Amino acid sequence: MGELSPELMDKLTKVCLCKGIPRSTMKKAILEGADTLEKVRKATGAGSGPCSGRRCTPKILELLENQGKA
Ligand code: FES
């Protein structure tokens, strides 16, 4: 794992498991101006799966806190 770039890890790591949306997509949305949970959900489609965002919401909030820096 140590040889994978952060960019690749972002592509491989799914934030929204229901919809299979990777962290790279979330970060892109945040960097493009989605500054609230609602906006990130709208821009990416996250949170609309069978779990209604129960699993991905905490991860999205964490990314928002870090403003795409993490
Ligand atoms: S993990 Fe995102 S809606 Fe279920």
Image (cartoon, rainbow, N blue to C red):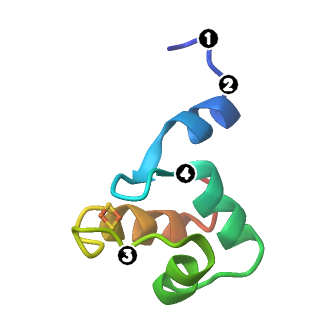
The mark found on residue 5 in the picture is 2
Residues under numbered marks 3 and 4 in contact, where contact means CB atoms less than 8 Å apart: no
Residue at (62% x, 18% y) in the render: 4
Amino acid beneath label 2: Ser
Question: Image quadrant of residue 56?
Answer: bottom left
Which is more N-terminal, label 3 or label 1?
1
**Of tags 1 and 4, which is closer to the observer?**
4
Amino acid beneath label 4: Arg
Outermost residue toward the right?
A: 32
Q: Position of residue 31 (x, y in %)?
A: 74, 69
The mark found on residue 23 in the picture is 4
Which residue does the numbered mark 3 point to in the structure image? 48
Which residue does the numbered mark 1 point to in the structure image? 3
Amino acid beneath label 3: Ser
**Of tags 3 and 2, which is closer to the observer?**
3
Quadrant containing ligand 1 reads: bottom left
